[in-house]
């Protein structure tokens, strides 16, 4: 009695390994992807984004990851020093001949408040809940017996997350934001066979970004992010340079370019253009891990667009309307 070895190996793998989350190299072009506390954590009325990632196309059928986000202010006080926002994010990640992947949706709720009367020190707290489906397409499998069926090609599970973020602007030359989040707090079971020892591990993320603008037309933006999920560790560090081309009451135009290092894995080149309410971002990973020989150093590329809504009333602004 023979079974297709590839299907058996896939089934065993999916029921014994611990799951990991979708991730992007665009560290904070769309900040709600990092932390639910960033939902609406800027001085605007809404923000909408889309991002696409294609990874390891030279090695096999590539990972293709897609995310769609939207966030809206539910309430702001008159000085914009307190507020409540809601956010929605949708993810799709698929790869391989069997198109194994995950589709998920998350709803986030965040509250921010000023920590000082000067309006230069804020904290935000956020929660999110969602639902995910993981699986593969059995019709793409080459079975020895075409009548043989795979009983459980997919699984469904809930997701819970939380985060906190801090924003500080001690002077006109410098501001920074730091965030910490926990995903998969409930560690859901993701087994295809109903086993109780296969679950999605909690993911812990710590992130910091600053901007130093001592110069009139350009600034320096260092960044660091650390994530851990089970045995997996990710450390990203680098810096961007931002060039302010136009700044007035009618137009905001800037260019930003940077280089970061995902420790032991990839060099990340990033280019971002801000044109009024739009942000256009392109990111490329050059693989330097042990897979570099097979991939010819080709890792992944990402393309993202973010649109920001704002009332434009500068007299009431407290939080800096940041593109990142």
Image: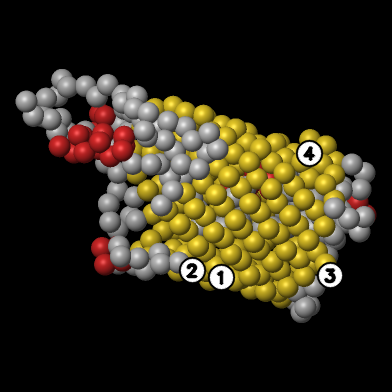
Q: Nearer the viewer, residue 70 or 81?
A: 81
Which residue matches tag 1? 238
| Number of numbered tags placed on the structure image | 4
Residue drawn at x 34%, y 24% is 194
Label 3 with label 4: CB-CB less than 8 Å:
no
Q: Are marks 1 and 4 in contact (CB under 8 Å)?
A: no
Identify the mark nearer the N-term, 1 or 2. 1
Q: Nearer the viewer, residue 48 or 73?
A: 73
What secondary structure is found at the residue carrying circle 3? Answer: strand
Residues at circles 1 and 2 in contact by the CB criterion of under 8 Å: yes
Work out how far the residue at label 1 is from the one at label 4, CA to CA, in angstroms.
32 Å
Q: Quadrant of the C terminus?
A: bottom right
Q: Between residues 270 and 39, which one lies in front from this camera angle?
A: 39
The residue at the point 67 percent across, 61 percent down is 274
- Residue located beneath label 3 in the image: 171
Under circle 4, the secondary element is strand
Q: Which mark is residue 99?
A: none
Q: CA distance from mark 1 to mark 2?
A: 6 Å
Coloring scheme used: secondary structure
Q: Which residue is mark 2?
A: 261
Give the CA distance from mark 3 to mark 2: 29 Å
| Mark found first going from the N terminus, 3 or 1 | 3
Residue 52 visible to the viewer: no
Q: Residues within 10 Å of mark 3 (few under 14, many from 20)?
A: few
Label 1: few (<14), some or many (≥20) within 10 Å? Answer: some
The CA distance from mark 3 to mark 1 is: 23 Å
Could you say where residue 232 lies in the image, as x and y percent from the top left?
42, 53
Mark 2: secondary structure? strand
- Residue 84 — which label? 4
């Amino acid at each position: 009695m023979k079974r297709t070895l590839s299907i058996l190996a896939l089934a065993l793998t999916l029921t014994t390994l611990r799951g990991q989350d979708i991730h992007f190299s665009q560290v904070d072009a769309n900040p709600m992807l990092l932390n639910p506390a960033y939902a609406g954590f800027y001085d605007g009325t809404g923000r909408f984004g889309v991002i696409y990632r294609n990874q390891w196309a030279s090695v096999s059928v590539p990972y293709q990851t897609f995310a769609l986000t939207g966030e809206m202010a539910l309430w702001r006080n008159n000085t914009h020093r307190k507020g409540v926002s809601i956010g929605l994010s949708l993810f799709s990640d698929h790869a391989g001949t069997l198109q194994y992947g995950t589709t998920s949706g998350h709803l986030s709720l965040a509250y921010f408040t000023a920590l000082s009367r000067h309006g230069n020190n804020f904290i935000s707290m956020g929660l999110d809940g969602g639902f995910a489906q993981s699986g593969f397409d059995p019709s793409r499998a080459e079975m020895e017996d075409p009548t043989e069926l795979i009983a459980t090609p997919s699984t469904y599970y809930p997701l819970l997350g939380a985060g906190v973020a801090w924003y500080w602007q001690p002077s006109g030359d410098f501001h920074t934001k730091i965030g910490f989040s926990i995903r998969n707090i409930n560690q859901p079971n993701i087994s295809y066979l109903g086993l109780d020892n296969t679950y999605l591990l909690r993911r812990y993320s710590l992130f910091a970004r600053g901007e130093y603008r001592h110069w009139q037309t350009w600034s320096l933006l260092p960044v660091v992010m650390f994530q851990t999920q089970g045995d997996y560790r990710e450390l990203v560090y680098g810096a961007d340079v931002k060039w302010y081309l136009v700044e007035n009451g009618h137009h905001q135009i800037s260019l930003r370019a940077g280089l970061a290092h995902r420790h032991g894995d990839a060099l990340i080149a990033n280019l971002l253009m801000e044109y009024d309410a739009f942000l256009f971002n392109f990111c490329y990973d050059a693989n330097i891990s042990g897979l570099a020989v097979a991939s010819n150093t080709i890792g992944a590329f990402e393309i993202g667009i973010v649109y920001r809504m704002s009332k434009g009333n500068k007299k009431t602004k407290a939080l800096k309307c940041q593109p990142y």
